[in-house]
Amino acid sequence: MRNFQKKTIWRDIMQSKPVLGILAILILIFAWSVLGFWNKMEDTIRNKKVAEGKVSELQDQKLKLSADINSLKTDEGKEKIFRENYGLSKDGEDMIVVVEDKNKPLEPLKKPSFFSSLMFWKKWFK
């Protein structure tokens, strides 16, 4: 009989309102932690995709740079770079340099006329 009474006392304690309230609070804390972990996991997945994109970009750049290095090992590649970047020419070749006139006169501003505003409205409502 005592054994039965001990079990009922333990059951009564576990089913009391304060203990159930504490258990409910613990469950809420656990759920809140799981949701926070889930958000962090989603951020990590997004960051992983961004990092993979950057890695593929860098691999493409590495391939391009390797091709540029290999082309610089040849005489044709060196000549191409010198011609493009430094404007050098071979013996017997002439070079023409075109320079823009930086002192161009500015075009005067046109005042809008009545007819130009009519044309604007016609185009707008077509």
Image (spheres, grey):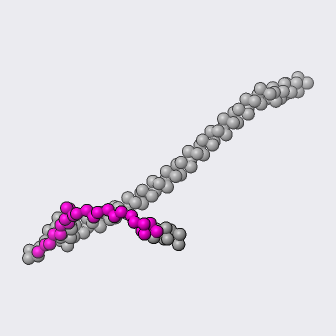
Q: For residue 59, say whether it is visible.
A: yes
Q: Quadrant of the N terminus?
A: top right
Q: For residue 82, say whether it is visible.
A: no
Q: Position of residue 106 (x, y in %)?
A: 25, 62
Report if residue 93 lies within the magenta region.
no
- The front one of 54 and 88 is 88
In the rendered view, tell whether residue 69 sits above or below residue 24. Answer: below
Residue drawn at point x = 19 percent, y = 61 percent: 103
Residue drawn at point x = 52 percent, y = 52 percent: 46
Q: Residue extending furthest right? A: 1
In the rendered view, tell whether residue 46 sits above or below residue 113. Answer: above
Q: Residue extending furthest left? A: 92
In this rendering, would 65 be left or right of 77? right
Q: Quadrant of residue 108?
A: bottom left
Q: Residue extending furthest top? A: 2
Numbered label tally: 0
Q: Position of residue 104 (x, y in %)?
A: 21, 64
Q: Position of residue 37 (x, y in %)?
A: 59, 43
In this rendering, would 94 be left or right of 45? left
Magenta stretch secondary structure, dominant: loop
Task: Magenta stretch: give its range.
Answer: 94-118
Residue drawn at point x = 82 percent, y = 30 percent: 15
Residue drawn at point x = 69 percent, y = 36 percent: 28
Report if residue 107 lies within the magenta region.
yes
- The front one of 117 and 31 is 117
Q: Position of residue 72 (x, y in %)?
A: 22, 67
Q: Residue extending furthest bottom? A: 92
In this rendering, would 68 be left or right of 52? left
